[in-house]
């Protein structure tokens, strides 16, 4: 099923944004319910997403190469200079990405790509979309940072550390959020998506100008009744918890509360005051640049030092290659 849209003469490319463990996979599956083309070649389901990641693997591979060319890892927290996007390697990868988009989504009036690092690659994608004459759109999965930390604790304790979890959250939210002003954008609260899927997918459909015909309505019902499972969510923290938690960085608290408000359409994305608030938060974030770089340098040195201890590489092999285990 392909979406029928109104109001756009160009194809629409949707980037799914959001920090890891924010419900981006669930939201991407919701886009498919609306008839948005999310591809068919996905990564295999893994323990943290047993029902699927919904990441188109060809675009995913290239996106990770772009991330690496910019000196980032999945858990990086430092700032990246805007000029880095114009270096030869990212520009070369941009042309490879154009070929991949044409091959896998060239037929689709509306298509979407989900990757946990999309928020850090927004300048790369905007340049590509402009060259390909694709209208950019953004669907932002919001989840309370305290819930993200609780989810991470079951999967990766290092990244669940309160300080690192907050800095990684900021790195996936703040660097380029001002570039979303004036574009198609909707913020979806993960908890509300589980509780009111029809309403939240309706908001997404409106943002993307998707006509809600019989096929789309059937897709929404199937998503709500057959795909969603409420036992996926083991914790829930509200805005009041954010306000009261003294261990949260003020910048995280203010950014999270603003995203939460956007997920209620109050303020709306057309409100100029909203973007003035984001620009002020970004200015605060940039002031942390030297400290964030110091943290990243320390992490890099620590990784190198740990590899001198044979227990670390042996443990990595043990975890990644089950055939080596004694059964």
Image: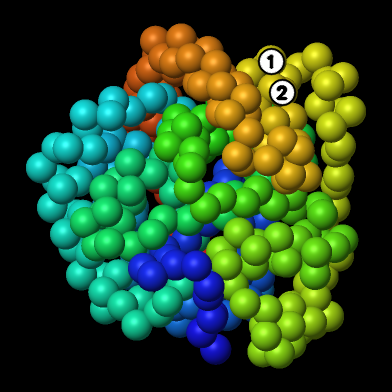
At 27% from the left and 53% from the top, the residue drawn is 130
Residue 163 in view of the camera: no
Name the residue tied to disc 1. 250
The CA span between labels 2 and 1 is: 5 Å
Residue 176, image x and y in percent?
A: 43, 34
Q: Residues within 10 Å of mark 1 (few under 14, many from 20)?
A: few
Mark 1: which secondary structure? helix
What SS does tag 2 mark? helix
Q: Measuring from the top left, give residue 137's x and y in whole percent.
A: 48, 56
Label drawn at residue 253: 2
Q: Report whether 126 appears left or right of 245.
A: left
Q: Is residue 125 visible?
A: yes
- Is 168 above or below relative to 151? above
x, y percentage for residue 320? 46, 60
Task: Kindly identify the residue that appears in the image at 16 percent across and 59 percent down.
Answer: 95
Q: Kindly indicate the quadrant of the structure image that contains residue 59.
A: bottom left
Q: In the rendered view of the protein, which quadrant contains the N terminus?
A: bottom right
Give me the residue at 42% from left, 63% from top.
Answer: 13
């Amino acid at each position: 099923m392909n979406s029928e849209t109104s109001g756009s003469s160009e194809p629409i490319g949707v980037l799914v944004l959001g920090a890891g463990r924010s419900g981006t996979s669930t939201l991407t599956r919701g886009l498919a319910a609306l008839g948005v083309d999310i591809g068919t070649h996905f990564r295999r389901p893994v323990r943290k997403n047993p029902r699927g990641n919904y990441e188109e693997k060809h675009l995913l591979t290239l996106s990770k190469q772009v991330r690496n060319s910019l000196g980032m890892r999945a858990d990086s927290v430092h700032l990246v200079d805007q000029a880095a996007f114009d270096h030869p390697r990212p520009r070369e990868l941009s042309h490879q990405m154009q070929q991949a988009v044409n091959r896998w989504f060239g037929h689709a009036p509306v298509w979407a790509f989900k990757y946990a690092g999309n928020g850090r690659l927004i300048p790369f994608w905007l340049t590509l979309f402009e060259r390909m004459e694709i209208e950019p759109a953004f669907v932002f999965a919001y989840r309370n940072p305290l819930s993200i930390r609780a989810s991470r604790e079951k999967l990766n304790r290092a990244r669940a550390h309160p300080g690192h979890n907050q800095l990684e959250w900021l790195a996936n939210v703040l660097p380029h959020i001002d570039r979303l002003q004036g574009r198609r954008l909707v913020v979806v609260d993960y908890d509300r998506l589980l509780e009111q899927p029809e309403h939240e997918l309706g908001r997404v459909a409106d943002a993307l100008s998707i006509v809600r015909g019989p096929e789309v309505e059937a897709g929404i019902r199937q998503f709500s009744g057959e795909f969603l499972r409420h036992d996926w969510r083991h914790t829930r923290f509200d805005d009041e918890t954010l306000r009261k938690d003294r261990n949260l960085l003020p910048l995280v608290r203010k950014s999270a509360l603003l995203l939460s408000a956007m997920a209620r359409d109050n303020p709306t994305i057309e409100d100029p005051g909203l973007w003035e608030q984001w620009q002020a938060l970004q200015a605060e974030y940039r002031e942390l640049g030297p400290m964030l770089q110091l943290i990243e340098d320390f992490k890099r040195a620590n990784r190198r030092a740990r590899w001198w201890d044979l227990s670390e590489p042996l443990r990595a092999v043990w975890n990644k290659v089950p055939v080596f285990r004694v059964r």
